[in-house]
Image: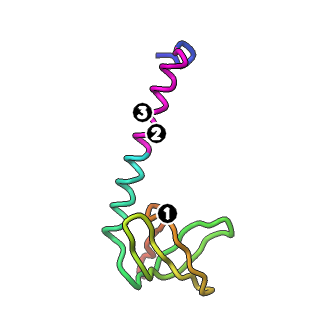
């Protein structure tokens, strides 16, 4: 299949399938992260300001509330949070 050969309707259908697949994969990733998170756990994530380090203070179904080292609160999707590895 060559994308150049698809009609506009076929491209819209393909786009819808791709968007649904992306949403599904993001949801699976969020669920995976949520099962690993605990209150008080040290985490990090990327923000426009750069890498942010903080502690989980609240876990919701679709977001995680993190307080950063500079006492700012961040409400972010679970899929963006990375758990700090203990050393």
Whether label 3 touches label 2, CB < 8 Å? yes
Horizontal placement of 54 versus 57: left or right? right
Q: Is residue 27 above or below residue 72?
A: above
Q: Is residue 41 above or below residue 76?
A: below
Horizontal placement of 18 versus 71: left or right? left
- How many angstroms separate mark 2 from mark 1 (CA)? 19 Å
The residue located at (51%, 23%) in the rendering is 11
Q: Name the residue under label 2.
A: 19
Q: Name the residue under label 3.
A: 17
State yes or no: residue 13 in magenta: yes
Q: Specify the quadrant of the image occupied by residue 17.
A: top left
Please provide the residue range marked out in magenta: 6-22
The one of 46 and 65 positioned closer to us in this rendering: 65
Q: What element carries label 2?
A: helix
Q: Name the residue under label 1.
A: 80
* Total numbered circles: 3
């Amino acid at each position: 299949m060559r994308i150049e050969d698809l009609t506009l309707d076929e491209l819209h259908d393909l786009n819808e399938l791709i968007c649904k697949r992306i949403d599904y994969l993001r949801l699976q990733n969020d669920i995976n992260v949520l099962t690993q998170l605990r209150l008080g756990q040290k985490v990090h994530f990327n923000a426009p300001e750069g890498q942010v380090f903080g502690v989980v203070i609240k876990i919701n179904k679709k977001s995680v509330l993190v307080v950063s080292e500079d006492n700012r609160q961040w409400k972010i999707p679970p899929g963006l949070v990375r758990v700090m590895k203990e050393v």
